[in-house]
Amino acid sequence: EVLLVESGGGLVQPGGSLRLSCTTSGFTFSNDWMSWVRQAPGKGLEWVANIQQDGSEKNYMDSVKGRVTVSRDNAKSSLYLQMNSLRVEDTAMYFCARGSGASRFGYWGQGTLVTVSS
Amino acid sequence: SYVLTQPPSLSVAPGQTARISCEGNNIGSKSVHWYRQKPGQAPVLVIYDDTVRPSGIPDRFSGSNSGDTATLTLSRVEAGDEADFYCHVWDSTHERPVFGGGTRLTAL
């Protein structure tokens, strides 16, 4: 069974930092691109970032470039999202998803909630 | 960037057919994927590559894609089908995935 489990969310003040994690099992993690997708409260899905199998290529949505870094540890089958200089508008549920978005996102985690507020 | 437009809401009587549209410029030339998201849950893939149902998805779900409109069709709607549905394509110009704004399906 394919499982993706996010963690690391929480309440943070504007300008603060968080590191999200996504632990996976049930598939060969090192064979797949991985992505982060977020959903602001009451809003739609928004792709945030993706990372190639070996970590050599990373892509980001414009509004997070320079503030967010995606990384992975294939030995631990885990995906990460380091978020710095957080803004109120970054408040969202953050999902990790299997795939780059160039094709389907076949599996999703349950998400971890990031709230940026003073 | 590439824009996908979905109706915000759709109401269908139980037992009837729901057709959820996803409009984009020449979307027929792209592969479209559809997700169902129930309240408080993660999205679930229900159709990929325009017409393909993943294992475990009922055959009441089907998809089509031509011209400027892709359509997700759900036949024999049940109360348990109430959810938000999102379409997704790859924007090859900007090399990033794009989602539609989502459609909330309500069974009257």
Image (spheres, helix red, strand yellow):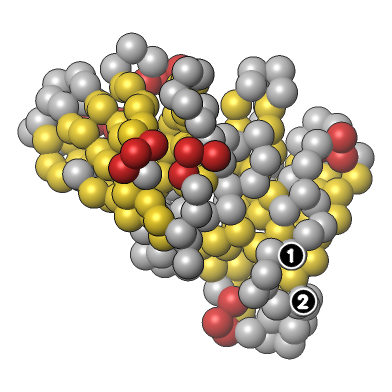
Would residue A17 be visible to someone looking at this image?
Answer: yes
Residues packed near mark 1 inside 10 Å, few (<14), some (14 to 19) or many (20 plus): many
Q: Is B20 positioned to the left or the right of B79 in the image?
A: right
Residue at the right extreme of this rendering: B67
The amino acid beneath tag 1 is: Arg
User: Which residue: 51% across, 27% down?
Assistant: A52
Front residue of A65/B107: it is A65
Percent coordinates x, y for residue B25 in the rendering: 81, 31
Would residue B104 be visible to someone looking at this image?
Answer: no
Q: Quarter of the image holding residue A49? A: top left
| Label 2: chain letter | B
Rendered view: A108 above or below A31: below
Front residue of B104/B38: it is B38
Q: Secondary structure at mark 1?
A: loop
Residues packed near mark 2 inside 10 Å, few (<14), some (14 to 19) or many (20 plus): few
Front residue of A21/B13: it is A21
Q: Which residue is mark 1?
A: B53
Q: Is B67 positioned to the left or the right of B100 in the image?
A: right
The amino acid beneath tag 2 is: Asp
Residue at the top extreme of this rendering: A66
Mark 1 vs mark 2, CA separation in Å: 8 Å
Q: Which residue is mark 2?
A: B59
Please state, as top left, top right, bottom left or bottom right, where the C terminus of chain A lies in the image: top left
User: Which residue: 57% across, 84% down?
Assistant: B79
Asked whether the residues under the numbered discs 1 and 2 touch, taking CB atoms below 8 Å apart as contact, a structural biologist would say yes
